Image (tube, helix red, strand yellow):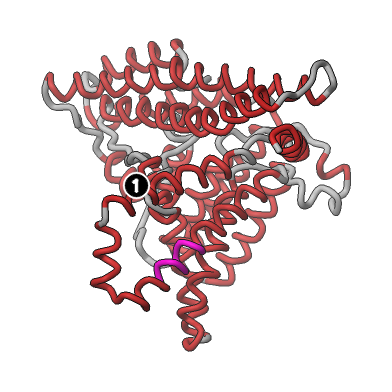
Amino acid sequence: MSVCSAEFIVAFLVLAAGFFRLPGAGSRRAALALANVVFLYLSVPNRGSWIALGIFVLSGYGVGRLLLRRPSSALFFGYLAAMIATFIVIKKYDVVTPILPVAVLHHSLVVVGLSYILFRQIHFLVDVLQAQIPDFTLGSYLNYQLNFLTLLSGPIQRYQEFHTYWLDPRPLATDRHDLLLAFQRIMVGTLKVSVFAAICIYYWEGAKNGINHAMSGEFALTRRFALRNFVTIFYLYPAYVYFNFSGYCDIVIGAGRLVGLKIPENFDRPYLSRNMIDFWTRQHMTLSLWIRDYLFTPMYKSLAERWPRKASAAVFLCYFVALFLAGVWHGATMNFVVFGLLHGLGVSATKIWETYLIRRRGRAGYRKYLQGPRTRVVAIVATMHFVALAFLFFTPDLNNTIDEIRAVMRAVF
């Protein structure tokens, strides 16, 4: 069930209307757990997928219990390797399909929300290993991992925040004004997804189909037709991604407030970013924080401690690897490898340029450079176009995308 559907919103509003009329924290927890079970029942397609979901989630709880009793880096990294390998097989990543037996890949498993479950699982186990989570219960862990509001597409909430809520769910919207703001957030999110995102994807698909029909020889791909359709493709897909994903986040954040759950913000005007590092602090913010805390920082710290003289150079490598992996995480096909490469190159180039300017002008000169209005406008426009370029490779068929770009280039030049 989509959280943007009328069925979901009506069902949720019924739940929210009676949620804080339930007596005590226990009955409210039971209502949330029931809502999670119903959502899973409507989303998990077959018995095998239920079993795979159960193994993936419950194994994390079991390993967490072992780490709580006796912290062990070997256990954590061994389980992490097994978890990532399982994730790759279930998602059928193109990079491994040629080397795996057909029998392993011939499955119909669809583990709903697996990408976000993986990130929450890693966060949870790292924090348990580092004693940042002193204790947890099976109920809070399962409902954290399978929370119907954040299961499908985030935002990536931290366990500690959810656990505090789970112990005693209390209202966040304490007056009529707060309630109206929560309802407004849901309404704005629904408009983004159902109207603006739908319009963007409609015209994007029309432009893409037009170029493909011309490529198949149905009619000539003229310069004017190629330019018009490519511009539509280039700008509308990033707009679609923003309206669709930020609209989804608006809905779940507003819905969370109605049942007392504070879900973290995920967007802050990303297309006003002045560089790619700034973009990743504004776009999918909870993913960016996860990358910083559980990928970039540990990787940089390890390299800097081992080769301290190379620490200044290692930061560029760490930025590249972190954002490359973030791009690849988005999907199993080869186009996401290109998408990840572009974002990795973008953030690395940003850091290299920043380092160059600081060395040449000093930090005071660098701050003055950043404050220049003309520089800011140019930087925002350049960043937006680089992001749009990367989004050309966000759609599944890499070969078709490359063929379209070649056909447009031949028609224009």
Q: Could you tell me residue 15's position as x and y percent? A: 33, 17
Q: Nearer the viewer, residue 32 or 310?
A: 310
Q: How many marks?
A: 1
Regarding residue 158, the answer to whether it shows in the image is no
Work out whether 353 lies above or below 230: below
**Image quarter of the C terminus:** top right
The residue positioned 43% from the left and 37% from the top of the image is 143
Q: Residue at the right extreme? A: 102
Q: Amino acid at mark 1?
A: Val
Closest to the observer: 54 or 204?
A: 204
Q: Is residue 72 above or below residue 136?
A: below
Residue under the point 87% across and 42% down: 103
Picture layout, residue 6 above or below residue 126: above
The magenta-colored residue range is 348-355
Where residue 31 sits, quadrant-wise, is top left
**Nearer-the-camera pick, 92 or 232:** 232
The answer to which image quadrant residue 194 occupies is: top left
Specify whether residue 21 is in view: yes
Q: Specify the principal SS of the magenta part.
A: helix
Is 240 drawn above or below residue 190 in the view shown?
A: below
Q: Position of residue 227 (x, y in %)?
A: 63, 29
* Secondary structure beneath label 1: helix
Relative image position of residue 65 (x, y in whole percent): 48, 57
Left/right of residue 384 with respect to residue 32 in the rendered view: right
User: Is residue 263 within the magenta segment?
Assistant: no
Label 1 packing within 10 angstroms: few (<14), some (14-19), many (20+)? some
The image quadrant of residue 20 is top left
Q: Residue at x 52, y 32 (%)?
A: 235
Residue with the mark numbered 1: 377
